[in-house]
Amino acid sequence: MPAADEKGDTFALLINPELRLGAYIKYNVKQLPALFQWKTLASGDYALGLEPMSQAPGKENDPATGMGTAVAPQKAFRFDLELGVLDGEEEIRALRDHIESLRTSF
């Protein structure tokens, strides 16, 4: 499970230092305890996915840890997710510092 604050909030961050731009996902590990990264490197095509998930791919549901919350047919699963863009080195540095503080207090 990723490091998070006392409410369970954590981040995934992607940075392009040359453009001084960043993109982030803020999510709650109590709702979505796993993070999956995928990418495709096809010639002339590149895609990256960062996906907060209720369970790691290929893992069975584990009620003891809350991993793998199953959603019954015709039911809903509510979660909080924030997507954002960071413009400039100052905004990127502030979020990186916050993320590092989560790691050191974990």
Image (cartoon, grey):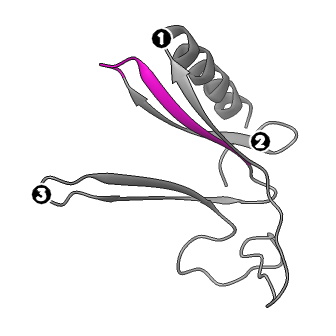
Q: Residue at x 40, y 17 (%)?
A: 20
Query: What is the spatial separation of the Cα atoms under label 2 and label 1, in whole angstroms?
Result: 23 Å
Q: Mark 2 belongs to which amino acid? A: Asp
Q: Is 27 on the left-hand or right-hand side of 91?
A: right
Nearer mark to the viewer, of 2 and 1: 1
Name the secondary structure under disc 2.
Answer: strand
Distance from label 1 to label 3 (Cα)?
31 Å
Of all residues, the one furthest to the top in this rendering is 90
Q: Which mark is first along the chain, 3 or 2?
A: 2
Q: Which mark is residue 12?
A: none
Pinpoint residue 27: horizontal percent, then vertical percent. Answer: 71, 47
Q: Nearer the viewer, residue 21 or 106?
A: 21
Q: Is residue 27 above or below residue 73?
A: above
Mark 3 belongs to which amino acid?
Ser
Q: Point out the tag, 2 or 1, that comes first from the N-terminus.
A: 2
Q: Which residue is mark 2?
A: 9
Label 3 SS: loop
Name the residue carrying label 3.
43
**Which dot, 2 or 3, sits closer to the camera?**
3
Q: Which residues are magenta?
A: 17-27
Amino acid type at circle 1 is Glu
Nearest the viewer among 46 and 52 is 46
| Residue identifier under label 1 | 89
Magenta residue check for 103:
no
Above or below residue 52? Residue 97 is: above
Residue located at (79% from left, 51% from top): 80
Q: Tell me what residue is drawn at x 72 percent, y 60 percent.
A: 32
The image quadrant where one finds the C terminus is top right
Q: Residue furthest bottom?
A: 73
Mark 1: few/some/many CA within 10 Å (<14, 14-19, 20+): some
